[in-house]
Amino acid sequence: MPIYEYHCRSCEGLTDKYFPSTKAPNALPCQHCHSNDTHRIISGAVYHQSEATKTAKLDPKYNKMVDSAMRNSSSADPERILRKLKPFPKKT
């Protein structure tokens, strides 16, 4: 959804306005000084990537680095929890 920015020639302020279509007016009243001497300017765009796209762009060495770090970590040992367990006492 486009958000348009307008620059005021009177007070040098910026006014932004959301329009649900691409038919935005060329000028709007300034929200700071209420002057009608504004003009639409080109503003930056935002691009949101999905998690799958971000993952696909990771360095191929990243998985090797993670695997190596996990091998060197004590928390990666599957037997560590079993070593902490104590057997139940036998009932007589």
Image: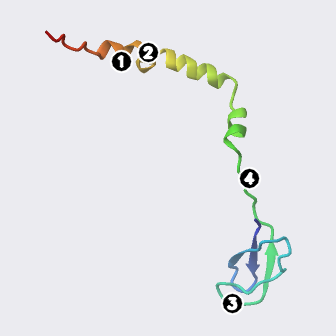
User: How far apart are the alpha carbons under marks 3 and 2?
Assistant: 67 Å
Callout in the foreground (3, 4):
4
Q: In this orientation, which residue lies closer to the viewer: 59 or 2?
A: 2
Tag 1 near tag 2, CB within 8 Å = yes
Neighbour class for label 1 at 10 Å: few (<14), some, many (≥20)? few
Helix, strand or loop at mark 3: loop
Callout in the foreground (3, 2):
2
Residue 14 at what x, y percent from top left?
A: 69, 76
Amino acid type, mark 4: Tyr
Q: Which residue is mark 2?
A: 78
Q: Which residue is mark 3?
A: 34
Tag 3 near tag 4, CB within 8 Å = no
Q: Residue at x 76, y 83 (%)?
A: 9
Is 36 drawn above or below residue 69 in the view shown?
Answer: below
Q: Which residue is mark 4?
A: 47
Is 68 drawn above or below residue 14 in the view shown?
Answer: above
Snapshot colouring: rainbow
Amino acid type, mark 3: His
Helix, strand or loop at mark 2: loop
- Closer to the chain start, of discs 3 and 1, is 3
Q: Residue at x 71, y 46 (%)?
A: 49
User: How far apart are the alpha carbons under marks 4 and 1?
Assistant: 44 Å
- Closer to the chain start, of discs 4 and 1, is 4
Q: Quadrant of the C terminus?
A: top left
